[in-house]
Image (tube, rainbow, N blue to C red):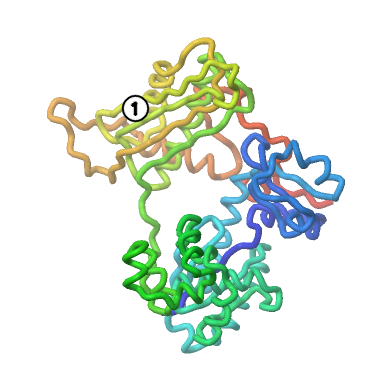
Amino acid sequence: MTYALVDCNSFYASCERIFRPDIKNKPVVVLSNNDGCVVALSKEAKEVGIKMCEPWFKIKDSFTKKGGVVFSSNYELYADISSRVMMTLEHLAPKIEIYSIDEAFLDLSGVDNCENLDQFGRQCKDTVQQWVGMPVCVGIAPTKTLAKIAQYGAKKYPGTAGVVDLSDQHRQKRLMALVPVGEVWGVGRKINQKLAAMGVVTALQLSEMDIKLIKKRFSSVLGRTVMELKGYSCIGFDEQPATKKQIIVSRTFSKRVKDLNSIQEAVSDYAVRASEKLRRENQYCKMVSVFMRTNYFRKQDKQYSGMLSCKLNTPTNDTRDILHAAKLLSQRIYKKDLNFIKAGVLLSDFYDEGVCQSDFFTPHKEREGSKGLMTTIDKINRSGVGKITFAAQGIEKSWSMKRDFQSPRYSTNWGELLVVR
């Protein structure tokens, strides 16, 4: 087996730069929900001293003085750019496994028989840059864990030009001797501390450990990691992502919310989004849950956290059914005179279409025209031309997230297309 791991560089920040060539070499940070703290940053931002998770209000003055550029999270843009990157990779490799929004494994079995792997890696890098505008690094190796090591080297050392091929065992050992054991895929903080106490501080040292000792002192999972570092492929290739077991949509409000009407608007908005995600999974749910809480950091406020669930008679992915259940649950959870700061909707107990056994006393009966209506709504909402919303979602949405620095949705909304003058 031969794998390539393609990883986007500073993904969120790079997405913003695609349509803003004027900030190509400037420090860039992307903020979390409600513009709270830094969740993504460019290499230049790291060089001026910005760190992950730093609160924006603490660094905004010094960062802007250094010529930095800030953006609110633009998830719709990031999801679309990610999709374009993955579609590009599908043109280049026989098989692709999407690992995260900015990473994908490629199965290169047989490619090495007709093409130099290092050249293939550079072709991947150049093609994604040319077709999408996204800079990537490529790590190539006989196992997924070694491909992660190769990708670490491609990002860490500029001399690699963003591509590292670890097909050669001698080269594997040279790089592993430079990689801290905490950077190995599957080695968490606690395992890292235990290994350090045993004198194991590099990936090479971990690869040389006895498998029986690893399984005895740690787990068979870490034993599998060690086998992968030794060059034995133990982690399979999954082209089809596993179906989700649950879907959750939750947000922190931009301000404290007291009235039931605003709470129900927010919960309804989250229920609509969750329903859309459920249909993208081609699943039907039978359990709807709603939760909400106050701000536990405000000690002067009365604290409260509540969650209720409702089991539906039959599985559904119709937004109207899920909306109805969510509104009833939010009304039951709500308490007067409390400052709510967050709410969310959770869908679970999933079924494929038509596989649920109906209850004897409540026979299965779908809404007439449900599937056609939901398909039409989703198609219109994905078109970028217009948006269909339910009245329960509200209009003004004063509770919605604060995004003072959000960029346009250049690639998914006709009204926000880039204008060149």
- Asked if 39 appears above or below 367 in the picture, the reply is below
Screen quadrant of the N terminus = bottom left
Q: How many marks?
A: 1
Question: Would residue 81 be visible to someone looking at this image?
Answer: yes
Q: Residue at x 57, y 62 (%)?
A: 85
Q: Residue at x 56, y 25 (%)?
A: 295
Across and down, in percent, residue 215 comes to: 33, 66
- Asked if 334 appears above or below 198 in the picture, the reply is above
For badge 1, the amino acid type reads: Ser
Across and down, in percent, residue 180 comes to: 56, 68
Q: Is the residue marked by circle 1 packed among few (<14), some (14-19), or many (20+) residues within 10 Å?
A: some
Q: Relative to residue 10, is residue 201 drawn left or right?
A: left
Q: Relative to residue 95, is residue 408 drawn left or right?
A: right
Across and down, in percent, residue 206 comes to: 46, 72
Q: Residue at x 40, y 25 (%)?
A: 307
Across and down, in percent, residue 148 comes to: 52, 69
User: Which quadrant holds residue 217?
Assistant: bottom left
- Asked if 85 appears above or below 410 in the picture, the reply is below
The residue that label 1 is drawn on is 309
Question: Would residue 99 be visible to someone looking at this image?
Answer: no
Q: Relative to residue 210, is residue 40 drawn left or right?
A: right
Helix, strand or loop for disc 1 = strand
User: Which quadrant holds residue 385?
Assistant: top right
Comparing 293 with 2, the one in front is 293
Q: Residue at x 35, y 34 (%)?
A: 370
